[in-house]
Image: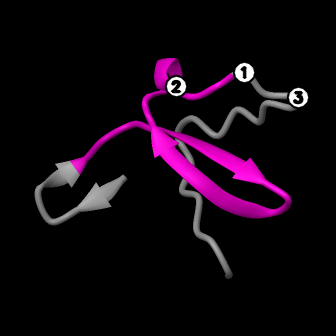
């Protein structure tokens, strides 16, 4: 997450192509598929 106060790591939960959750990876439920995007930016709708 990039904000005016800095950068923080987070996991993103996606269901049916839509972001439904942003939380620590430990707080997200288990997933059918996992994509490792560490060190990358995830930008929706671009």
Does the residue at mark 2 contact the one at mark 1 (Cβ under 8 Å)?
Answer: no
Q: Residue at x 64, y 40 (%)?
A: 37
Q: Give whichever of 31, 36 is nearer the camera.
A: 31
Q: Position of residue 39 (x, y in %)?
A: 52, 40
Badge 2 element: helix
Quarter of the image where one finds residue 31: top right
Q: Which residues are magenta?
A: 7-29
The one nearer the camera, 6 or 32, is: 32
Q: In whole angstroms, how far apart are the C-alphas of marks 2 and 3?
A: 14 Å
Nearest to viewer (mark 2 / mark 1) = 1
Q: Tell me the crowding category of disc 3: few under 14, some 14 to 19, or many 20 or more residues within 10 angstroms, Cα based.
A: few
- Residue annotated with mark 1: 30
Determine whether, in the image, residue 33 is placed left or right of residue 25. right
Residue 25's disc is 2
Residue at coordinates 52% horizontally, 25% vertically from top-left?
25
Crowd rating for badge 1 (residues with CA inside 10 Å; few <14, some 14–19, many 20+): few
């Amino acid at each position: 997450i990039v904000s005016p106060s800095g950068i923080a790591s987070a996991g993103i939960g996606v269901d049916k192509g839509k972001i439904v959750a942003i939380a620590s990876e430990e707080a997200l439920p288990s997933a059918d598929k996992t994509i490792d995007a560490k060190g990358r930016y995830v930008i929706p709708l671009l």
